[in-house]
Image (cartoon, helix red, strand yellow):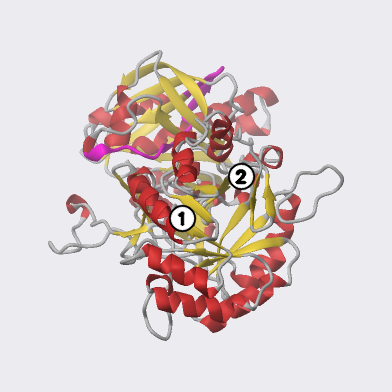
Amino acid sequence: MSVELCGLKLAHPVINGSGTFDAIAARQVFGEQLRERFPFAAYVSKTITLAPRAGNPPPRLWETPAGLINSIGLPNKGLDGYIEQDLPRLAELGIGAPGGEGERTVPLITNVMGASAEELARLLEACDERAEIAAIELNVSCPNVHTGLDIGADPRQLEQVVRAVRGRTRKPLIVKLTPNTADVSACAQGAEQGGADALSLINTLRASALAPRVRDNRAGGHAHPWLGGRTGGLSGPAIRAVALAQVAAVAARVAIPVIGMGGVQSAAHARDLLDVGATLVAVGTESFRDPEAGARIALGLQSHPDRSKA
Amino acid sequence: MSEALFGRRLLTVTGNDQLGAYRVLRADDPDGPPAAPGQFAMIAAAEHWGGGEEQRPYLPRAFSIARLRGHECHFLLEHVGPGTRRLCELRAGDGLWALGPLGRGFTAPDDGRRALLVGGGVGIAPLAILQDTLAGDAAAEGPGSAASASATTVLLGFRDRARAEGAALLDGARVATDDGSVGHHGLVTELLAAELQRDPHAVVYACGPAAMLEGVRAMCEHTAVPAQLALEAGMACGFGACYGCVVPRRGGGYLRVCVDGPVVDAAELEHVDEHAGAPA
């Protein structure tokens, strides 16, 4: 089941979606068994920004039919905190550091977000200097400080941003596409033409929830958003069919590899994404229900033949 | 603190008994590491989890471990939404997914302080295992030991008579009810104030509704009595991955209730806010 993505050799095709598995917290909870049984073939970090962020005020979660809306707000230690504090702790888990003789290591993909090409360039240059980081994923679901538009929502803007920062790193550059756009295939093509080495999709679908009426005494009868960040992103099985359509459309349009994700709960769901053209599959919200889900799905894929060979 | 097994495991429900307005769900957990008082588990029914009201539940639910009896693990349930409703329906022989024990629990009293356990509503659950543990420690140290001298006092508050039946989960509890149907007519924090006035050389262990915890926190701050508060928050994962269960930390930033708590030193909080939306 080993697979290659942009020169990275992976033990199997299942990785985590950014922001859905915190390896450092998981080690605190599960201890050293996490290292021995790490569930993903590569580890994708939470989104890292230049400056530290506390994240959105609570409430941050809302359960939907077969899904979850989150409005977390990208809390992170900032670039310096990530490099100084997180990289050594990840290395202790065998993530992102060359291991000793016979030691299994898990490649580290660092996800970064910036509100401008200048910010992204600084993030990419800093990541480029670190041997621990195998590849960089750009989170482009972020408003451009100059235009106010989501960087990833407009094909031409996305192409320009990727082209502007592409030269700042020699490492593989993955662009994580937003599904909140009129034409995801056009955005995919823009990212490819700008110089992306791979694409990942789908990110969460923009979503909102209103506070329950019974609890909503302060709102005076007006609709009142439940989430502290007002809107959030929908994930989980509720978005699986959307993900399958978008991954298929993008894989048909571009020549670069695609990492497919969105509502994957089982090997059968992962196989669907691989069969429509994904090279890797990411597991996200399902890991919240079962931290071992990535390993379970990777194991299941071995006995889930791809349709072309079936 | 016990490390959780990596990955969820399938338990068998051994019983689900009515206790006033609550239910005590029991499940056989032969492989789970023993829980420390204050730790919790993420649980979900193995069958028909989803497809209820509004096509929920989807995520597992966080529950304090209320008691351990050999390999049997007990949870205290109150039906407040589609997840708790489904858990209340479970019967002996049904399957229960569990991940845990998770989180930081209570720490034992030191310098001879007596333990004051203060609970409200379904939040009394972690105080039951805490009382068992403190009693076990006292028994192990023998009569006349520091632990046995620091006998525990249990103060519990409920809305009404049906909920007050939950007090049977602990031994020797003094009860307050909002409607005066059982025990003291008023708030459990009024019982606490009297106890602290009588003897302030105590450590307070509290779990319950946000308003009660805030009352406990403010009182303990005012009287300089150490307090450990078991918090509740809506969680998607329970092991630090989702960052969804945060509460504001004194001095800025947030605590993750699942990995920085659920038991926190009261001094870490400026204020206990309304729970951040448990997916019930």
Check disc 2 and report the residue beneath it: A40
Q: Residue B85 lies in what quarter of the image? A: top left
Residue sitting at 58 percent across and 26 percent down?
B32
Q: Residue B182 lies in what quarter of the image? A: top left
Quick check: A81 above or below B183? below
- Is residue B5 visible in this depiction of the protein? yes
Quick check: B197 above or below B174? below
Check disc 1 and report the residue beneath it: A251
Same chain, marks 1 and 2?
yes
Q: Quadrant of the N terminus of chain A?
A: top right
In the image, what residue type sits under mark 1? Ala
Mark 1 and mark 2: Cα distance apart in space: 22 Å
In the image, what residue type sits under mark 2? Phe
The boundaries of the magenta stretch are B54-73
Q: Given the image, what chain letter belongs to the residue carrying mark 2?
A: A
Q: Position of residue B53 (x, y in %)?
A: 22, 36
Question: In what element is the residue under mark 1?
Answer: helix
